[in-house]
Amino acid sequence: LFSPLKIREITLRNRIGVSPMCQYSSVDGFADDWHLVHLGSRAVGGAGLVICEATGVEAIGRITPDDLGIYKDEHIEMLKRITTFIEQFGAVPGIQLAHAGRKASTLSPWKAKSRHEKVDLTKDQGGWEVVGPSPVPFNSEWAKPHELTIPEIKEIQEKFRAATQRSIKAGFKWLELHAAHGYLLNSFYSPLANFRTDEYGGSFENRIRFVVETARILRKEWPAQYPMSVRISATDWVEGGWTIDDSVKLAKILKAEDIDVIDCSSGSVRSGDRYPFAPGFQVPLAEKVRAEADIKTAAVGLITEPLQANEIIQKEQAD
C-alpha cells in the first residue's frame, strides 16, 4: 500500500488515492476556501493522489447548482491555488471531468427537508432541462430528459475538450473522465438507459461510442507525460444491464486509446436497483478488469481499513 507507483512521468508516493467526493459547496461552479481545505488536508494527510470532486464541463452538466465547475476560464485561478498546495505537500492533484446528464438539476443532499422530498429542481427552483441518450427519466418522479441529437453530442465533447485545456492551466497532473453512476457517459453505454437507434445506440459498439470518442479527445489534449483514468460503472448488477464482461471489452478498447487506469465503480444507472453492499464489494470488478484487459485498475467502495487496502494491493486485485 505504501509502495510508490509510477505511471508515465508521474510518481504517486503510495497507492492511496482520494476519490472524488462531491462537496456541493460552490457558487456558479467556483472553488473556494472550503475546497482548498478539504483537498489540501488530504494531501497533508499523506495520500498519493487527491482527485477533485466531479467537476462540471458545462453549467447544465452539474449534478446540483452547488457543484464545482470548470466551464469558464475564471474558474482556473482558485483551482490553480489548490493544485499548487496539494503538490507542495507531496500529493498528485487530479481532476474528474463530468457531465451529470439526466441526473443533473437536483437538490443538494442536505437541502432536502426529508429524505422523501422530490429532489429534481424545476426552473423556478433554479433547475434546468436535463439531457440524455433517450427521453427516459432516472425514475418516474424526475424530469424527462431531452434526447441529445448528434450535433449536441459533438458540442458536449467540445466542452470536455475545453475543460481539459483549463485543467492543464489549473495545474492538474492526473485527469479522470467520469463515465459511471448513471451520469451522461454511463447512461449512453448502459442498455438500461439508452434506447437509441442511431450510431450512438443499439449495439455494444454504438453504445460505447460516446465514451470512447470522448476519452480519445481528452487523451489527445492531455499532456503525454500525465496519466489519465476513466471511471466506469463496471456492472449494472441487474439482468439485461451492462455486465463485467462488457467492462473488460470496454477496458481493452480504452487501453488502445492510451488510457492508463480503469477506476472500477458500479451501478446507479437506474433508480431502485439494488447492489450487494459489503466491505470491498467492488474489488472483484477491478480484479477482473485488471487481469483480463491487462490494464491498471483502481478499486473503490467500502474500502475502509488499512490492512484491507494493503491486501488488495498485495493480491494484485487493483493497483
Image: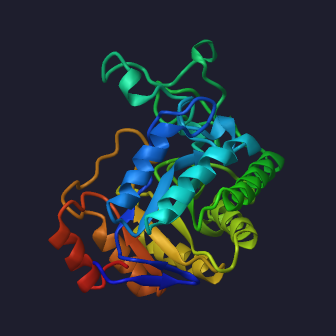
At 60% across and 23% down in the image, what residue appears? 127
**Residue 58 drawn at (x, y percent):** 69, 41
Residue 255 placement: quadrant: bottom right
Residue 203 placement: quadrant: bottom right
Q: Nearer the viewer, residue 135 or 118?
A: 118
Q: Is residue 116 above or below residue 276?
A: above
**Residue 59 drawn at (x, y percent):** 67, 36
In what quadrant of the picture does the N terminus appear? bottom left
Q: Nearer the viewer, residue 154 or 39?
A: 39
Q: Is residue 200 above or below residue 260?
A: above
For the question of whether residue 203 can be seen, the reply is yes
At 70% across and 69% down in the image, what residue appears? 222
Q: Nearer the viewer, residue 311 or 225?
A: 225
At 29% across and 70% down in the image, what residue appears? 283
For the question of whether residue 239 can be seen, the reply is no
Q: Is residue 66 above or below residue 305?
A: above
